[in-house]
Amino acid sequence: MSDILGTATTFAPELVVLASALLVFLLDVVGVRRLEAVGAVHVTGSSIALLLVLADLGFAPLAFLRTVGAGAIDVAPAAGSAPLYVVSSFGLVFQAVFLTASLLVGLASMSRDSREAGAPIFFGLLSLATLGMLFVALASDLIFLLLAVEVTSIATYLLVGYTRRGIRPLEAAMKFYVIGAVSSTLGFFGVSLLYGAYGTTNLFLIGAVAGTVGYPVLALLGYGFLVAGLAFKTTLVPFHAWAVDVYDGAPTDVSAFLAGGSKKVGVFAFFLVFLGPVLFVHPGAPGNPFSGGPFAIGPIVQVMLGAVAVLTMTVGNVLALLQREMKRLLAYSSISQAGYMLLGIAVGTGPALAGATFQVFAHVLMKGGAFLVVAGVAGLGVGPLVDDWRGLSQKRPLTSAAFALMLLSLAGVPLTVGFVSKFVLFSAAVDARGYFVWLAVAGLLNSALSVFYYARVLKTVYFEAPEPAPGPTGAVVGGAGPPALPCGGLGYGRAVAIAIATVAIVALGVYPQPILGPIQAAASHFVALGA
Amino acid sequence: MLPLISIVLASLAAGTVLTFLAGARARWVALATSAVFLGEVALLFVDYSGWPGYAGTPLVPGFAEEETHAWIHLSWLQVNYTVGVDGIALALILLTAVLQVATVVYSWEERRRPGAYFGLVLLTCLGSFGVFVALDVLLFFLFWEAVLVPMFFLIGLWGGPRRRYAALKFFVYTHVASIVMLVGLLATVFYSGSTSLDFASVDASARTLSSVDQSFLFLALFFGFGVKFPIVPFHTWLPDAHVEAPTGGSVLLAGLLLKLGGYGLIRWAVEVLPTGFANDRPILFVVAFVSIVWGSIVSLAQRDLKRLVAFSSINHMGIVLLAIALNSSLGLLAAVLLMFAHGIVSALLFMTAGSVHHTFGTRDIAGLGGITPTTPALSTMLMAGSLASLGLPALIGFPAEFAALLATWYGLGYWVLIPLGILVVTAAFYLWMMQRVLFGPPRGVPVGAHDVPWFEKLSMGMLVALTVLFGILPGLLVNVITSSPVHGFPGP
């Protein structure tokens, strides 16, 4: 009994999220379909879970909520044991990131059109996807990891297509599903090869066995398949092509969740596989058993990861330059940002890991926030093209200002959170010396390149004159529109979500220490846990 | 002790925000902010040990008024909010304050979006002030970039016919340069194993770097700062930006922005990487001589008054670079004096060029003549500016150029003939321009043209007065500059 209770407290945040998902489905059955009510369940659930996670991370004011003792976090398992999960402060940081994304998207989605088919289910699926993401952050076994990724994936396939309206969401959902199934298969196949090579799927045991057996061809093949499978989820070049169509076709709030939230699942899995229970570590990392040894395979893998990171950034940025539609532009920019996150793994030191994690967190605020604005603005009758945003600043000054801040942050302009995350990441790369300095230079040149397309959007929004208002005849096509929402047509929930993201972008850009400090501590624990 | 510099920074920032929000009354808010800023800078001077009559206790070696607070503290990255001034920074801060007041007064009748215009002018000055006081790599970079953005908008929104092209060119050139500069500074920090990004820490540990490393890092920093200078061949943004910018923008560009490059080179490259500087000096000399000769020859070919002043800026900043490259205390003093002098004089000349344009509808030297009877005040200002620029004794240009030539003679011997010869050519050209535009029979003077309005007279008159004051009493500045804790100077 005490065992079950102990497990229950360890999984308290997950249980809360699961409960909120079930409650949403239950409410749907009972007939409660008001979006505000259903959304409130999801938002409440995510908020409680977020507070629990923050308490476990050691935020002093929340100490009374603590469910996992400080002594039980960041503890390496006994040698030879094969735990399915470990509670690490790094995993908790990612849980907090995931819950933030879920919370922001849930808040904004409370302002969706209530008459949409299946709208209440949206929140249930969102909670389920979040649940899978929370489990990912606990995994220490490859099967556990891939199963958790599957939970998230299946929920997100449904999220992309749940409106069942129009051909584009359906096409996007189908594409997403097929690609997702292929990538999961690749991942599982890779794990089975690894099992053949090492006789276990536990990451700690693999680390121990590889220390003596080395890396036979079978294992390398297994890693190859596993990495390819995860690269799909993370939208790394050349596995990125699906992402743009899916982000473009999905309901925009879902795109916000995909780009800001569920994609980070792949990023965390990468961290876990490459850095966690040491497989391919930076040769200079303290305690790395392979430095200079017979299994010094790390540097080669690092060069490959670095190349993929630079390729991903560059391809994403160059293609973003060519886009005329706002959502596709943001989707390509999202691909390029995945490159920055991978850079952290390629460098592979604790500082670089902290920088990449902060970049993940920043990306939730700026890219997730930007998609939420796009969704809200679409509700005001603005079309999908960048040119449709002409002169929006004159009609919606506050919304435009928030959007401008998000884009400036994505471009890495000082005094925004995006600048701090890039600064930390690149300085960590320079700190690692060697050819990593050139990775930093490539990253900096890429951010200089990205300034152009963000600046073009800003120019459209701020410097160009708005379209003349359509005549009264044009406005009545399709009957009376939905009633105008409060908060400048955005609705309360969306306005609050956008405001939170904007304030956080600026506040953390000016003073990042409260978030960056814990992330740094967690990252160094994580690297130490594997070593 | 009062956190004097933070108070100045905060009041300037608050004034800038208020100006942006003030709409039609922005000019009054801007004027009040600049006046307060000038007063505060005066306080900084009175509190500084190099100032005559300073009676406080002698300062400890290092920066006066230094303040430091933890900002971002990670295991491998210690970023602090650290600010402080020395004499070099103080001289340039005075320049910032003076030019801010002068620009606000000169642009008094700006009617197009005055809130944004005056706000951007103040923001440029705020960024420059920040650059001069920042003693932390990240803080320095933040302020450095904070100067770029408002200037981009000043050129792009209020500029002349080719403003979009000029604004974009300015932004791309200087932004790429600042990225190289940032990488150079970060590499200096991490390769030297400096524990924090503070100037003191970077300065101390950078000396441990190998000679080759220092040479490369110095080159990266030289490129980063040099584009702002601007050095030939990366100077082509300057004529476009200066000519297309509105007059207020040109004044800040020539008066302040070019000085950021010089200050950055002295503070963050020459001081921090002395060995690299010593190794790379030949490159600096070549670039300096090319800039001096090229800037001057090209300015001879200009017919547009504003382009003439713009190219002569390249020539003058070339002399600044030469003086820095001499690596002597007299050369350093000359460089700072030259920057101060050029800041005041080029601002004055750009104002007169702007006023000529408003009054006569053209800046074409060949199309103008004998304007003195119509606009006596403007002509006086133009003459004063030109004479100061060509180095007439008793005006501010003279002590600066004299010090620079003297230092060159000590350092390089007969090579001094190159800048000296160029000075003669430039002087002749200025005299020709004055003779043509100011005297002789009137040409190109529209009917009903009258002298410039009071606010233009006031702002230009202020700069002329400073030209004379510091021309007669350069010791006021020299004492302050040489009390900096820089090697070769007597120090505080």
Image (cartoon, rainbow, N blue to C red):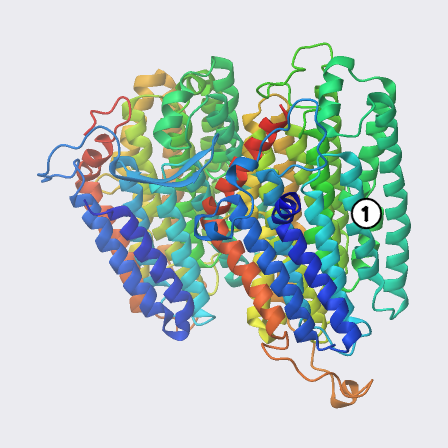
At 31% from the left and 35% from the top, the residue drawn is B336
Left or right relative to B432: residue A71:
right
Name the residue located 75 percent from the left edge and 24 percent from the top edge: A206
Residue B151 locus on image (x, y percent): 48, 53
User: Quick one: which residue is furthest to the front in this view?
Assistant: A1
In the depicted structure, whether residue A146 falls above or below residue B106: above
Instruction: Pinpoint residue A391: horizontal percent, then vertical percent.
Output: 63, 70
Mark 1 falls within which chain? A
- The location of residue A3, given as percent across then percent down, is 65, 43
Could you say where residue B211 lies in the image, as x and y percent from the top left? Answer: 47, 13
Looking at the image, is A358 positioned above or below residue A154?
above
Nearer to us in this view, A67 or B296: A67
Is disc 1 placed on a helix, strand or loop? helix
Crowding around mark 1 (Cα neighbors within 10 Å: few <14, some 14 to 19, many 20+) is some
Provide the residue designation for mark 1: A150
The type of residue carrying mark 1 is Glu
Residue at horizontal 62 percent and vertical 51 percent from the top: A12
| Residue B394, picture quadrant | top left
Residue A366 visible, this orientation: no
**In which quadrant of the rendered view does residue B66 lie?**
top left
Nearer-the-camera pick, B401 or B281: B281
Q: In which quadrant is the C terminus of chain A drawn?
A: top right
